[in-house]
Each structure stands twice: as C-alpha cells, then as structure tokens.
Amino acid sequence: MSTGQAALDFSAGLLTTEHELRRRLLDDVARLDAAGKLARCQQCGTCTGSCPVSYAMDITPRGMIARVRAGDIDSVLASRSIWLCASCYACTARCPAGVPFTDFVYALKRLALARGGGSGRAFTDAFRATIGSLGRNHEPLFMLRYYARVGLLGLVKRTGTALRLLVKRRLPFLPRRIAGIGELRGILGRSAAAPRDAAGTRP
Amino acid sequence: MTRYAYYPGCSLEAVGKPYDLSLRAVFGRLGLELQDVTDWNCCGATAYAAVDETTALTLAARNLSLAEAQHPGTDMVAPCSACYLVLRKTHRLLAEHAGLKADVDRVLAEGGGRPYQGGVTVRHPLDVLVNDVGLDAIAKRVVRPLTGARIAPYYGCQMVRPEGAGDDREHPMWLDDLFRRAGAEVIDFSMKVRCCGGMLMTTAEPVGRRLAADILAAAVDEGANVVVTTCPLCQVNLELFQGTLGKFAGRPLHMPVAYFTQLLGLALGASEREVGLPLNVVPLRGVLAPPRREALHV
C-alpha cells in the first residue's frame, strides 16, 4: 500500500490503489458502454482543441484520457480540470472516435466526490441540498448555501447583481416545496442510504 | 388547436420569467396551447450528474413520467436548454439501455411514482416554431417587422448538441432563418454555438468571465445591436454581468440580451409588457425602429 493511503480514505469503502480506482471508474461507465468507446480514443486532441476552457486546465481533455489509460487516475481526480467542464458537449459532438467525453467527465466527478473532495464539492452539495429540501431550485437559497461553504465575501460581491434581479422581480422571495416532495426524497435518499460499496454495487 | 405539455423548469419561475411570459405570448398568438405539467421537479441540470447517475436519471424521468400520465400522446416543451438536454438525453438513454431503465423504474416505484413508458418527445420551442408551425406560417403572422434590429443569433451549447432536433451542430440556422422572416437583419455570428460559461461564472469566475466576455465582444464587433438567446443561463450570464465583463475586456460591452421569444412576440404584435421586456436589466431602447403607423393598419 502506498504512503498516501490516509488521503484515500473513502466514506463508501476503502479504495487504496490505482487498480481499485480503475475498477471503480470502469464499473461506473460500463452501463453506458463508455469504457468501450474510451478504448477507441486515438489521442488526436480534437477534444482539447474544441474545449472552450482547456486553456485554463491543468490536465487537458486529451491528457485526461491518456492518464486514465496509463494508470494515473489519481492525478486526474485531483485536477481542477474536471470541475472546469461546463458540459457544453463540444468535445462529444466533434470526437471522431465517438467518445462521449462529457459523460466521462461526469464519471470522474462522481469518483472524485466519492473520494471526498475536489473543488466542485461545495457547489454540488449546495445544489443537492436545495433540490432535496424543495424539489426545485431556488436561486437565493442555493447561492446562500454555496457561499456559506466557499466564503461569504463572494456573496457580498454578488449583492449588486441580486438587487438588480430583485428590482426586476426576477428573484423569488419565498421558497416553495413541490407537493410530491416525499416521493422525490425517496428518489434522492436512495443514493444517500445505499451508497455503492467497495465492489461498486448496491445492496 | 395544437397542444403541448409544458415543463417550464426552475429558471423560468425566477430569473427566466421574461422567457416564460414571452413564450406564452408567442404560443398564444400562433394558436398553440401549453398545458402545464403538474408538480414537476428540477431536471437535475448538469450538477446532479456529478452525484449519482441513476439518481440524476430518475429525477429527470419523474418529469417524463408525470407528463406522460397527465398529457398522454403529447409532446413536451422544455424551453431551458439544460432541461431540454437532460430530459431528452434521459429519454434516449432509457430507451437504449434496458438495465438502466429497470433501475430507474424501480427507484421511481419505490418512491411511490409511476414507471416511465417511454412515450414523451421533448421539444425545444424553437424546434416547435420552425418545424411544427413553419417559417411561412409565422411570416404571415408578423404584424410588426423587426426593422432596425441587427440580431446576433446566440444558440449556446445544450440546445444544439448533442441531443439537438436536426439543426446543424456547428452552424445552426433556425434562429437566423426565423428572424430574417420576421423582418430583422441577422448577422453571421461567429460565436453562435460557443459556451457562455454556464455555472463557471459562480464556481470559477475568471474563466466564466472570459467566455461570456468573448461572446459579447464578438456581438459588438460584428455589428449586432441585440443578442437573442434560447436559454435562461446564457441570458443571465450575458446580460447581468456586463459591467464586470466590460472591465475585464477593457472596453464597454453594452448589449441588450433578449429571449428569442421576446423579439418574436413583438413581431407577432404582443406588447412589450406581454413579452416581459420591462423585466430585462439592459433595456432594448433604440434596437427596433419605431413602428410605422400605416403598417399597423394594413
């Protein structure tokens, strides 16, 4: 076992090696057969060239696939790149080998979150909590939750923007719950109540 | 009267209110009926896909299932590009992957819901206008040609790819064609399918700023006097942060950003109030030539 073992202490089972990361990633993408498609990547770099945010990435889209295939999933999960993907699907639309790269990034995001972190955690948690309590998004609550995690200074900077929207009656004051919130929580709670175990399956 | 089930999505209840108002105005004037899907939930957007795949698909599938039960045999209109993509993609994935569908149906049933039978076609309102109503029919209903408008047609990402309804992914033309028929000048916009930055304006501001600023700067440089959008997140990113974006770009980036349904609604004779123009933060003042009196009394 590596000396970095403590840093790889997962809440949903212990993953300690690159080998296990790989198995888990492949399990995740297997259902949509993304793994098979990933194998067809010819490293041409069309994804990186098409990506509007690759200039800001520490590992480019082409580089992510290369690293995953070479057995270095760990550095990809720790990169800021996966959290810069805004799901514009330019890579997916243009890939000559038909690799659904956007979906692959989702799988990487899931694995990074399951491992406990990444810069995307605060945003995802805030969104998840808002949908779980109301059934729909409520922008003010969502942003309060988000900035409470990453620093309230950001919220202060957004005050002007929020006021402009408020004046135009484009921000709702009171959050409202959908009637079927119980049913929805049943759906959402399921993933919290039954996380994937180390083998990647659910009870 | 042609009927559509209507899934407005969370944004259209708040920041995207002008989109909701103007969409209803346009559909009403063209004799298309929108029937609300009752008790819909968030589609999951891009964020939920990072949590858990089955959960994200089930969130979206609950809406498809509700629409199917409440409005059987009816296409469902989803105006927000993110909702449109997620709902269409979910429908396709569930049709293609039986195992996935079994998982999703089981979770729906466990929550007390109804399995999804696969019977809902999700449509973007632009698709409905161009392909169901038709450009000729719309052109005949134009009572106030959009003279004076020099439109940058901004399609964004998620309406055109990868679940688009037939327009070209790299160089879509539906908005271009629609607004030419409505009497506007439409520029050949170089950034029509570039990403607006989506949530990056919040999660990685320097990156998000650059994406949005590039789009606005192109609209200015290529001679537009208004940008039209098809998505609430694009509209907010391009309209609301123009001050910041101008500072970032080192020059003013002033540009009205309207929903395509707002301008089309005006062309079809709806009032500025009906299409929600008073709710826009950047006013459309001076974009349209004043209506000619004689034209209104033909």
Image (tube, coloured by chain):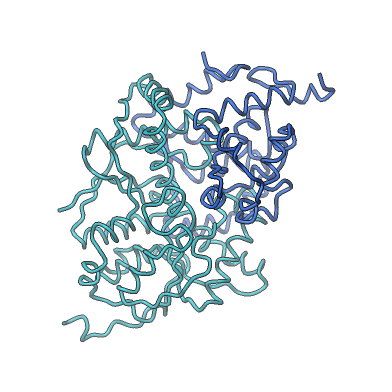
Q: Determine the residue positioned at 38% across, 45% down.
A: B9
Percent x, y of residue B129: 28, 60
Task: Determine the residue positioned at 33% across, 76% down.
Answer: B146
Quarter of the image that includes the C terminus of chain B = bottom left
x%, y% of residue A47? 61, 51
Image height of B271 relative to B111, above or below? below
- Quarter of the view holding residue B39: top left
Across and down, in percent, residue A87 comes to 54, 47
Specify the quadrant of the image occupied by residue B195.
bottom right
x and y, in percent, of residue B80 in the image: 41, 51
Task: Name the residue located 47 percent from the left edge and 42 percent from the top edge.
Answer: B45
In the image: residue B70, left or right of residue A169:
left
**Residue B131 sits above or below residue A81 on the image:** below
Which color has been applied to chain B in this rendered view? cyan
Which residue is outermost to the top?
Answer: A203
Q: What hue represents chain A?
A: blue
Q: Is residue B268 left or right of residue A113?
A: left
Front position in the image: B248 or B87:
B87
Which residue lies at the image location 42% right of the left edge and 30% below the top edge?
A: B97
- In front of the other: A144 or B240: B240
Residue closest to the eye, B105 or A150: B105
